[in-house]
Amino acid sequence: MAARILNALGCPEETELSVSIVGDRTIRTVNRDYLGKDRPTNVISFSLQEGDCGGVNPYSLGDVLISADTTAREAEDSGTHFFERLSFLLLHGILHLCGYDHERSGEAEAQKMQQKEQQLFRILKKEGLLNPSGL
């Protein structure tokens, strides 16, 4: 799934990222310690292309952490399948690593990110990748 998302974004084949599926306790700790928010969240991304050492390895995008607990609650609340919600959060996290932002860059950038999410999610759905048995 991650490879297909990166390919659709035009990332080089050598692109690397780390994906970790964790529980609410772990993601809450990370959210508190690194982002100052003492609560669980659904997905957190840490870019290796930003900051003082950003770009040392142009193929290493960074880390995506997804809470399986929050994903399950959100899937149930929205009436979607767990795997579909997990895939969307992976997509969301990867977009952050590729420079998209919906929190700090204003409404226009948030809209741009949302449009890209919708475009890529339609591609994943059309290709049958959102069905876990189709993997």
Image (spheres, rainbow, N blue to C red):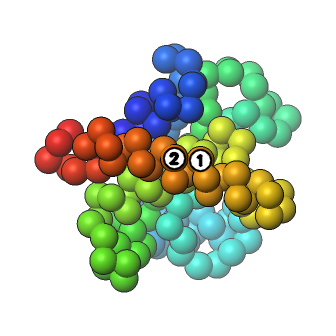
Q: Position of residue 32 (x, y in %)?
A: 66, 71
Residue drawn where x is 70% and y is 47% of the image = 100
Q: Describe the element under mark 1 as helix, strand or loop.
A: helix
Where is residue 23? Give x, y as percent: 40, 67
Q: How many marks?
A: 2
Quadrant of the frame with the C terminus: top left
Kindly identify the residue that appears in the image at 59 percent across and 79 percent down: 39
Position of residue 111 relative to residue 126, above or below, is below
Q: Amino acid at mark 1?
A: Lys
- Residue visible at 33% across and 58% down? 84
Residue identified by numbered label 1: 116
How far apart are the alpha carbons under marks 1 and 2?
5 Å
Decide which of 32, 93 is in the foreground and name it: 93
Q: Is residue 11 above or below residue 104?
A: above
Residue 39 lies, with reference to residue 125, above or below; the image says below
Residue contact between numbered discs 1 and 2, judged by CB atoms under 8 Å: yes
Whether residue 20 is visible to the viewer of this picture, yes or no, is no
Res 8 visible? yes
According to the picture, the residue beneath numbered tag 2 turns out to be 119
